[in-house]
Image (cartoon, rainbow, N blue to C red):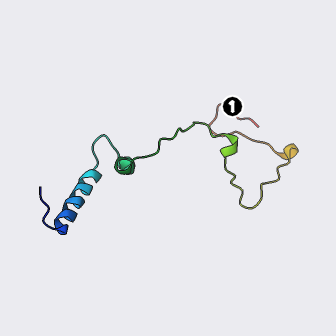
Amino acid sequence: MKIKSRRNLLKMAGGLAMAAALPSPKFSWGGMWNQLFGGLQREVSPITPNEEFYITSYRMPPDVRVENWSLTVKGLVKSPFT
């Protein structure tokens, strides 16, 4: 196949890019980036290790006094406790 002009080349390249971007039934839109450009495989642990956990305090970590602190579980539970 002979390409006669740069415009025809760009049309063909655009058509191929659009055809590659169309989702197939076995893939989702979220995985399209990985389909086109490949993705890095990473292992995901169901439990976050302590050293990778983030802190949600805005300014300074809260000062928690253990002797005054308690946790209460109540509501739609079988046995509420503190």
Most distant residue in the right direction: 67
Most distant residue in the top direction: 78
Q: Is residue 82 left or right of residue 39?
A: right
Q: Position of residue 49 (x, y in %)?
A: 66, 39
Front residue of this view, candidates 47 and 11:
11
Q: Position of residue 48 (x, y in %)?
A: 63, 40
Choose top left, top right, bottom left or bottom right for residue 74: top right
Residue located 35% across and 46% down the image: 28
The amino acid type found where label 1 is placed reads Ser
Residue located 69% across and 52% down the image: 55
What residue is disc 1 on? 79
Q: Is residue 46 left or right of residue 57?
A: left
Choose top left, top right, bottom left or bottom right for residue 57: bottom right
Rendered-image quadrant of the C terminus: top right
Q: Secondary structure at mark 1?
A: loop
The correct choice, above or below, for 44 with respect to 60 in the image is above
Residue located 79% across and 42% down the image: 70
Choose top left, top right, bottom left or bottom right for residue 78: top right
Q: Position of residue 4 (x, y in %)?
A: 12, 65
